[in-house]
Amino acid sequence: MSRIGKLPIAIPAGVTVTVSPENVVTVKGPKGELSQAVDPLITVTVDGAVCHVTRPNDEKEARAKHGLYRALIHNMVVGCSEGYKKTLELVGVGYRVELAQPQVLNFSLGYTHPIYLGLPKEVKVETKSERDKQLLGQICAKIRSFRKPEPYKGKGVKFQGEIVRRKAGKSAGK
């Protein structure tokens, strides 16, 4: 049995989890509402304040999807109750980012042109917290791809706490 898949999902107060006959799981909470279609191989049941994800057999496809859907549903529950946040930092002289319009970021990353990135309505730049972990990860990866940290001075966009592998013989600050 999958170690991840067999773990029950605790549903906090204020969050409701419903499973439709079409096997679509919907999670509603104070931060919003998310839904996920689940493969017919996987069975999702809600018992009070606990959600269980089970599989009918030990076939390879069922084993692969068991832990996946349990993790997706858990992420939806956490996102609708607490939310997620990611912190990025700009390293480099003159690198900056500003909110050009209500959902548009303007990046100045040392190129000859500014980079504009339109954000989905679910992402709030000021609060830095989100409910959809997958969407937030995609946006952060896209922002990081504009200027990845380089190995000499470490300039670029990196996740907070990320260690940049530097070239041998190069020291910080030179």
Image (spheres, rainbow, N blue to C red):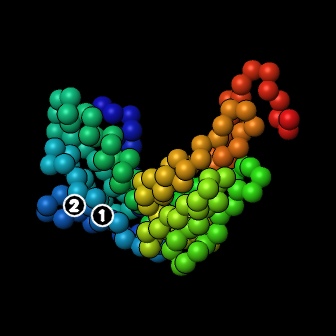
- The location of residue 173, given as percent across then percent down, is 85, 38
Query: Would you call the spot at circle 2 few (<14 residues within 10 Å), some (14-19), or many (20 or more)?
Result: some
Residue at 34% over, 47% down: 70
| Front-most of residues 44 and 40 | 40
Instruction: Give the image location of residue 123, x and y in percent.
Output: 49, 68
Point out residue 34 in the picture as x, y percentages from the top left corner. Answer: 35, 66
Residue occupying the point 52% across, 47% down: 145
Left/right placement of residue 119 relative to residue 36 reads right
Tell whether label 1 touches label 2 (CB within 8 Å).
yes
Left or right of 104? Residue 47 is left
**What kind of residue is marked 1?**
Ser
Q: Residue furthest front?
A: 112
Give the spatial CA distance, label 2 vs label 1: 7 Å
Q: Residue furthest right?
A: 174
> Would residue 44 be seen by someone viewing this image from the given angle?
yes
Q: What residue is disc 2 on?
A: 24
Q: Residues within 10 Å of mark 1 (few under 14, many from 20)?
A: some
Name of the residue lying farthest toward the bottom: 102
Identify the residue at horizontal 36%, vertical 51% (top origin): 72
Nearest to the observer: residue 23 or residue 111: 111
